[in-house]
Amino acid sequence: MALLTPDDLQNMTDALVENDNLVCTLTGLSLDRLCADIYKTEKKNEKIAIIPVTAGCGIIGRFSESLLFTVQHFGMDGFITKNTDIAGFYEAVTSGADIILMADDLAFVAYNLKSQKIAHNQICTGRVYAEILCRMPTPDAAAKEVLVIGLGKVGTPALETFLDYGYSISVFDADSRRLNEVVGGSGYRCPPNSSGKIKKYDPNAGCKFDKIFEATPAADTVPECCLTNGSVLSTPGIPCGLSKTLQEKYNVKIVQEPLGIGTLSMLYAVF
Ligand code: NAD
Ligand code: 2YG
Ligand code: MG
């Protein structure tokens, strides 16, 4: 998994605020209300402990601080434990935390100590970025088309959301084995493709997409031929898959932020 760097998080506070405004313009809901509606949950003054974890590649500068900003920005009570790892877990529990947030190199989870609900960042991130596109008004039902680029641990759960909303999904992944698995409806976490709703993206077919989802660790993954004026790109992928030149040429609106949107989705999943 590509790990975040302190540089990725340098502007996350501004990015979270800007993305909240953009999501509100696109969907009519703030991120907070959107997540409440996705999971049908509400916050109830939960105390959220953020535990820095030293395992593997260790503490990432600005990671815990960005989580705390997210928690407080959306009106929740949070703190970063003074201790790390297991001592941090003990501190969180004995300080009366209701929910803990913690990440090592393989998993970033939210765990509700009272209800025992648990949420995984990759699943919740895929879901919320997909929901943003699904909740944008579509002129007619027949036009429920989306292009999904990147079919990994974030892109795959997004497919389920698009299927739930009745989308026809064009997919692309640089790994042809993964692409074939997903189109065939088999393999790791693949939603069944029984109704033929998931097809390979064919760049030669001339299809343009108003809605594009991207979750890859690569740049320049969104090809010019899929863009139309005013396309919306909802992308957790870091770095951004769309070049500045193409963004400006097609007036593409981009929902992208490195940590906070996915974290809010995780919290509502465990409220
Ligand atoms: P992953 O490795 O599980 O999946 C990435 C997929 O992208 C793979 O299937 C890979 O074959 C494909 N891919 C790689 N290069 C490609 C290219 N040039 N064109 C098309 N497909 C390509 O990774 P993941 O866990 O799904 O994460 C995807 C991205 O999302 C990463 O950049 C990760 O850091 C980021 N991420 C962001 C957030 C957030 O909150 N913004 C949260 C989680 C993950
Ligand atoms: O506590 C710390 O500071 C570190 N142990 C955090 C490690 C997080 C590693 N995970 C990632 O970098 C991400 N790919 C997952 C975070 C989701 C947002 N992109
Ligand atoms: Mg990318």
Image: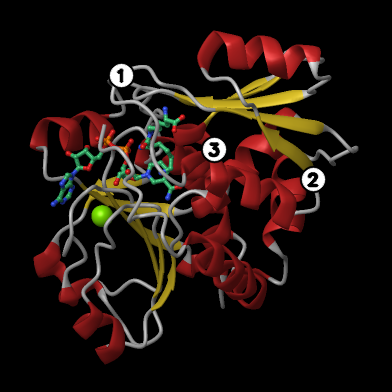
Depth check, mark 1 against mark 3: the one in front is: 1
Residue that appears at 56% across and 59% down: 132
Mark 2 CB within 8 Å of ligand 1 = no
Q: Nearer the viewer, residue 60 or 106?
A: 60
Q: Nearer the viewer, residue 67 or 271?
A: 67
Q: Horizontal and vertical percent for residue 92?
A: 71, 19
Q: Horizontal and vertical percent for residue 237?
A: 33, 52
Mark 1 CB within 8 Å of ligand 2 = yes
Q: Alpha-carbon neighbours of circle 3 within 10 Å: few (<14), some, or many (≥20)?
A: many
Q: Note whether 143 is above or below 219 in the view shown.
A: below
Q: Note whether 269 is above or below 186 in the view shown.
A: below
Q: Which residue is mark 3?
A: 124
- Mark 3: which amino acid? Cys
SS at mark 2? loop
Q: Which residue is mark 2?
A: 76
Q: Horizontal and vertical percent for residue 198?
A: 33, 44
Q: Note whether 49 is above or below 261 in the view shown.
A: above
Q: Horizontal and vertical percent for residue 59?
A: 40, 31
Of callouts 1 and 2, which one flags the residue occurring earlier in the amino acid sequence?
1
Determine which quarter of the picture holds residue 147: bottom left
Q: Nearer the viewer, residue 124 or 45?
A: 45
Q: Alpha-carbon neighbours of circle 1 within 10 Å: few (<14), some, or many (≥20)?
A: few
Count of marks overlaid on the render: 3
Marks 3 and 2, how far apart in space?
19 Å
Left or right of residue 168, residue 239 in this image: left
Marks 1 and 3, how far apart in space?
23 Å
Q: Which residue is mark 1?
A: 56
